[in-house]
Image (spheres, grey):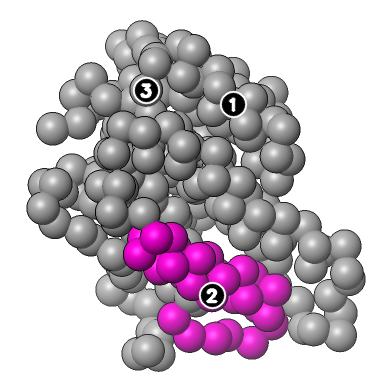
Amino acid sequence: MLKGQVAIVTGASRGIGKEIAIKLAEQGMKLAVIGSSEDIHKSAVDIKGKGFADVLPIQADISNEAQVKEAVERTLQEYKQIDLLVNNAGVGFFKQVDKTTLEEWKKVFEVNVQGVFLGSKSVLPHMKERKSGTIITISSDVARYTIPNGSAYTATKYAVQGFSGSLAQEVREYGIRVGTINPGMVDTYFAESEQGLEEKKDWLKVEDIANAVIYMASAPKHMMIDEIVLHPFVQDYPIA
């Protein structure tokens, strides 16, 4: 169902974003992969090394409107269409409120919320014109409940959930679907951690999130999947 379609994946230099890109390529999609550092070029080489030719690496800051618009324009120049946007890029830190600096607060909002807004806004004119498209944002289970020492990160995920719900209602008349994937604990590089640590062996894997993206993106046109929430079996969490 996804074969021959075009996807943009943000935060695709490593971890969840890179795995999402690989899984989408396995489905036969053409890719534009976006990352904030030069590592995005290595990621693209790695993906191409798995036998997938159509991978366009773009180094861009997703909180910068001009750079996001340019990334979308480059994708359209290369592939002529955009069928799927995966807003995956995100940052996080965990501190008490009185220990959090204004710069830290601004940074997490710029990437996690402003980046989602700019990416979505930039693809919408094209998707509206085609009356087709899917926007998926990788959010978090803390979009559904709160945790201590995570005020900034949690606030961004509540914001993303509200933004996505409102946008979904706004664009449904154009045949555009909008949804979020809200994982619990994932074995990845989040919050300056390392992937593959022994303490994370029972956590969700990056391929679990990527598979959820495939499921949501592959839904038949008559079906709308608003949200997928998934947790590792070992995670104890409050029910929203």
Query: Which amino acid lies under the numbered mark 1 shown in the image of this protein?
Result: Ala
Taking the magenta stretch, the answer to whether it contains residue 164 is yes
Question: Looking at the picture, does residue 19 appear above or below residue 155?
Answer: above
Front position among marks 3 and 2: 3
Residue that mark 2 sits on:
158
How far apart marks 1 and 3 lie (CA) works out to 13 Å
Residue 117: x %, y % from top left: 58, 53
Taking the magenta stretch, the answer to whether it contains residue 119 is no
Q: Quadrant of the N terminus?
A: top left
Residue at image point 28% right, 39% down: 132
Asked whether the beta carbons under mark 3 and mark 2 sit within 8 Å of each other, the answer is: no
Residue at image point 18% right, 43% down: 218
How far apart marks 3 and 2 lie (CA) works out to 31 Å
Query: Which amino acid lies under the numbered mark 3 shown in the image of this protein?
Result: Gln
How far apart marks 2 and 1 lie (CA) works out to 27 Å
Residue closer to the observer: 67 or 103: 67
- The boundaries of the magenta stretch are 144-170
Picture quadrant of residue 40: top right
Q: With 183 as the anchor, is 25 left or right in this view?
A: left
Residue that mark 3 sits on:
81
Q: Characterize the magenta stretch by its predominant secondary structure.
A: helix
Label 3 CA crowd tier, 10 Å (few <14, some 14–19, many 20+): some
Q: With 44 as the anchor, is 108 left or right in this view?
A: right
Q: With 161 as the anchor, is 155 left or right in this view?
A: right
Asked whether the beta carbons under mark 1 and mark 3 sit within 8 Å of each other, the answer is: no
Residue that mark 1 sits on:
71
Query: Which amino acid lies under the numbered mark 2 shown in the image of this protein?
Result: Tyr
